[in-house]
Image (cartoon, rainbow, N blue to C red):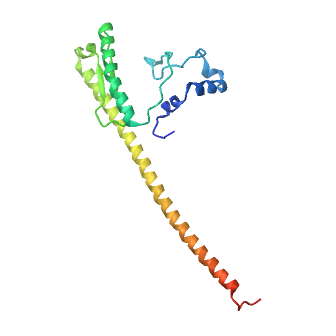
């Protein structure tokens, strides 16, 4: 699996059958509260500072490692998600602020703000929330780019090292061939002293 795939997404590339095979080897602590045939829990949910368990109803899709495909999928899904969030917020009157961005994205992050949050009299709260989100996304994307650049630089250094080693190997093979030829001539020469 490529190192660019986040660790929390790597396990989702496995098939459901692989997950079931792995569950047989897991200890009982990891299987608590997960009914047989279940797809596990949605990760990253919480209520306040407490983890919130929400059972998945379907298996997770495979991770799209092709950035073109993942960008297209993201582009198709986000408008639908934003529309559903808007409907939910209008129906319930909840406060909501959602931020999304692709790791390889070169565009600004997308965000959704519920009408109730937009209507708050103290707009400094929303301004601070937005600035914090912008800094977080920028930091994450820079970090990823730096990691990618570091990996590319390391790869370039390894390629140069490999080229040097290949050149050294070729020189040693040439020298060995010359030594063998010289040894062969010495062994075949009539003036050998025994």
Of residues 61 and 165, which is closer to you in this image? Answer: 61
Q: Quadrant of residue 91?
A: top left
On the image, the x and y values in percent for residue 101 come to 34, 30
Q: Quadrant of residue 77?
A: top left
Q: Is residue 132 above or below residue 47?
A: below
Of residues 139 and 69, which is closer to you in this image? Answer: 69
- Please state the total of marks drawn on the protein image: 0
Of residues 96 and 75, which is closer to you in this image? Answer: 75
Quadrant placement of the C terminus: bottom right
The answer to whether residue 103 is visible is no
Q: Residue at x 23, y 14 (%)?
A: 119
Horizontal side of 136 relative to 36 (left or right) equals left
On the image, the x and y values in percent for residue 133 come to 32, 28
On the image, the x and y values in percent for residue 28 come to 65, 21
Horizontal side of 194 relative to 140 (left or right) equals right
The answer to whether residue 139 is visible is yes
Q: Residue at x 53, y 67 (%)?
A: 168
Q: Is residue 173 above or below residue 163?
A: below
On the image, the x and y values in percent for residue 95 come to 32, 14
């Amino acid at each position: 699996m490529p190192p660019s795939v986040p660790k929390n997404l790597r396990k989702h590339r496995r098939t459901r059958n692989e997950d079931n095979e792995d569950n047989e080897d897991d200890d009982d602590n990891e299987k608590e509260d997960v009914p047989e045939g279940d797809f596990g829990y949605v990760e990253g949910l919480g209520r306040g500072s407490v983890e919130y368990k929400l059972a998945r109803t379907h298996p997770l899709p495979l991770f799209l490692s092709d950035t073109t495909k993942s960008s297209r999928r993201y582009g198709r899904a986000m408008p639908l998600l934003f529309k559903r969030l808007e409907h939910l917020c209008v129906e319930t009157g909840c406060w909501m602020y959602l931020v999304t961005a692709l790791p390889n994205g070169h565009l600004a992050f997308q965000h959704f703000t519920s009408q109730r949050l937009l209507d708050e009299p103290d707009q400094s709260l929303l301004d601070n929330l937005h600035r914090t989100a912008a800094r977080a996304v920028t930091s994450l994307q820079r970090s990823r780019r730096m990691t990618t650049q570091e990996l590319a630089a390391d790869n370039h250094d390894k390629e140069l090292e490999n080229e040097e080693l290949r050149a050294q190997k070729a020189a040693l093979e040439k020298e060995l061939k010359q030594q063998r030829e010289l040894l062969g001539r010495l062994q075949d020469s009539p003036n050998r002293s025994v």
